[in-house]
Image (spheres, rainbow, N blue to C red):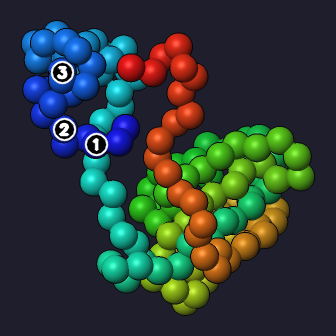
C-alpha cells in the first residue's frame, strides 16, 4: 500500500523472501480479489479539480435505487458512494472544478432523477487526512 511501484526484488528484501516467491504471493492476492488494482495518486488541485463536496441523498423508495446507482456509476465526478444507515440513504464524495460544476451535477443530474427526495451538500474547505491505505490488523501485515 505504501509503494505500488516497488520491484519484486525490493519487496522480497523487505519480506525476507525470494523475488519469485513474492511475485507468486502477489498473484494469489490478485486472484483472491484482495488486491483490486494499481493506480497513481493525482493531486486534484493541480489538475483543476479543486472542489470536493459530500452529498447526502435520500431516495423516495427502494425501487428508485437501480436508476440512482446507474447514475452514480456513469458520473466520473462521483468518486465514492456509500449506502448508509440513518436519515440519508447514500453519501457521495464528489470532486469537480467548482461550484458551477457542482450545481450542474446536483441540479441537472441528481435532482432530475426520479425518486430523489432530498440532497444535502457539504462543501469541503480543506482536507486534513485522506488515504487509500487500509488499517490492516497486525496478523495480516507483512
If the image is split into quadrants, where does the C terminus sit? top left
Dot label at residue 82: none
Left or right: where 29 falls relative to 101: left
- The residue carrying pointer 3 sits among few (fewer than 14), some (14 to 19) or many (20 or more) residues within 10 Å by Cα, namely some
**Residue for badge 1:** 3
Q: For residue 44, which quarter of the picture?
A: bottom left
Q: Are marks 3 and 2 in contact (CB under 8 Å)?
A: no
Q: Secondary structure at mark 3?
A: helix
Residue drawn at point x = 18 percent, y = 23 percent:
13
Q: Residue 8: give x, y in percent of width and height.
A: 13, 26
Q: Relative to the observer, which residue lies in front, 132 or 30?
A: 132
Determine which residue is flagged by label 3: 12
Determine crowd level at label 2: few under 14, some 14-19, many 20+ residues with C-alpha closer than 10 A: few
Q: Report the mark closest to the observer, 3 or 1.
A: 3
User: Is 66 left or right of 25, judged from the image as shown?
Assistant: right
Q: Position of residue 30 (x, y in %)?
A: 29, 21
List the residue tagged with mark 2: 6
Amino acid at each position: 500500500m505504501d509503494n505500488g511501484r516497488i520491484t519484486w526484488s525490493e519487496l522480497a528484501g523487505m519480506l525476507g523472501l525470494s523475488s519469485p516467491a513474492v511475485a507468486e504471493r502477489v498473484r494469489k492476492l490478485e486472484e483472491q480479489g484482495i488486491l483490486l488494482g494499481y493506480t497513481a495518486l493525482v493531486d486534484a488541485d493541480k489538475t483543476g479539480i479543486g472542489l470536493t463536496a459530500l452529498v447526502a441523498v435520500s431516495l423516495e423508495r427502494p425501487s428508485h435505487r437501480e436508476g440512482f446507482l446507474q447514475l452514480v456509476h456513469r458520473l466520473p465526478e462521483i468518486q465514492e458512494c456509500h449506502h448508509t444507515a440513518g436519515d440519508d440513504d447514500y453519501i457521495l464524495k464528489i470532486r469537480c472544478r467548482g461550484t458551477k460544476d457542482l450545481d450542474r451535477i446536483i441540479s441537472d443530474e441528481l435532482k432530475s432523477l426520479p425518486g430523489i427526495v432530498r440532497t444535502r451538500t457539504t462543501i469541503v474547505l480543506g482536507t486534513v487526512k485522506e488515504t487509500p491505505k487500509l488499517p490492516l490488523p497486525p496478523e495480516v501485515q507483512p
